[in-house]
Image (cartoon, coloured by chain):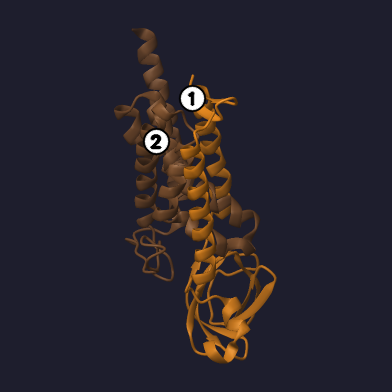
Chain colours: A brown, B orange
Amino acid sequence: MPDLITHTAIAYAFGRPLLSVPTRVLFYVGAILPDLLPRPLYIVFPNLYSYSIAMHTPAFLIILTLLLSEFFAPAMQKTVRIYFILGLILHLFLDSLQKHLSGGGYYWFFPFSWSSFEFGLWWPDQFVIIAPYLGAAVVLNEIVIWVIRKRR
Amino acid sequence: MWSSGRIIRVVIYAIILLFLIWYGHENNPAITLDRCMADPEKYDGISLTVGNEVKVYLVSEDGFVIQQLNRRMPVRGKVKELTPGTRVTISAIFHKEGWLELQDIHIVKHREAKIWLSIIPVALIAFLFFRYFRFHPKHFQFERR
């Protein structure tokens, strides 16, 4: 996986110009959602790694989105589902750009198939190098927007 | 209060999620060191990738020893730049005598940085989320502020 700064910064690049603030926040949550459950689990408990496999698959994440949306006001549920899912599609797409030694990738059709796929362009650790620059670009953009608004 | 339909949906989704977690654990076809060591004869000569929490324990003349959780395993194959503590992912052939023949290696860099850097956006998004949404305890749901 790319680090979450990279995921968030790229979600920001799409969300900032296109979406209103609350919707954008839901999109950002969706963009980090695929890593929120499995990564802490196997970083803290590495021997439970095999239990985290399902958590990074589209099927699991879609059901999780449906579950989480139930905890929002009924009038918001459709919006929550749409933007969580758009966010997680972006996340999974970015993850699919990576390469792994096994040539494996992610289980897109789990639980129906164990076949996996990735584009294999970069090692996961290569994203960390650009993360500070992406983070800085987001902060800089927000400062510029703030200054422009204040001058008006 | 929640409708009975909503409660039923939550229960069904939770059951499906638990099933998927269990299914992934039970049926993952990946060959792991655990599987190989549980039945060395069966997996002798098979190729596998070892990458979950793998560190170099020591470097020897003909290779190195990896440590994955509490297990150590000698790997034959010379690699430059390896030092004890280096995180690696290796592709190797398993031998029933209890060693691995190196095929390919990737030295994992910046893992700790990746973990710590990832905390920043989680905190920022959580802050933004609770700025625009609040949890209504009575309705047990998030609502717009």
**Nearer to the camera, B99 or B79:** B99
Above or below A148: residue B131: below
State the residue lying farthest toward the top.
A152
State the residue lying farthest toward the right.
B70
| Chain letter belonging to callout 2 | A
Distance Cα–Cα, label 2 vs label 1? 16 Å
Q: Please identify the quarter of the rendering in which residue A152 is found.
A: top left
| One can see residue A16 in this view | yes
Kind of residue indicated by mark 2: Phe
Q: Which of pointers 2 and 1 indicates the residue nearer the eye?
A: 1
Kindly identify the residue that appears in the image at 53 percent across and 32 percent down.
B126
Above or below B24: residue B103: below
Kindly identify the residue that appears in the image at 34 percent across and 35 percent down.
A13
Kind of residue indicated by mark 1: Glu
Kindly identify the residue that appears in the image at 29 percent across and 29 percent down.
A18
**Nearer to the camera, A88 or B53:** A88
**Nearer to the camera, B31 or B17:** B17
State the residue lying farthest toward the left.
A18
Q: Characterize the local packing of mark 1: few (<14), some (14-19) or many (20 or more) Cα atoms within 10 angstroms.
A: some
In the rendering, which numbered label is found on residue A61? none
- Horizontal and vertical percent position of residue A22: 41, 25
Above or below A47: residue B64: below
- Horizontal and vertical percent position of residue A141: 38, 26
Kindly identify the residue that appears in the image at 36 percent across and 12 percent down.
A149
Above or below A29: residue A141: above
| One can see residue A6 in this view | no
- Horizontal and vertical percent position of residue A15: 34, 32
- Residue that numbered label 1 is attached to: B143
Element class at badge 2: helix
- Residue that numbered label 2 is attached to: A27
Do callouts 2 and 1 point to residues on the same chain? no
| Chain letter belonging to callout 1 | B
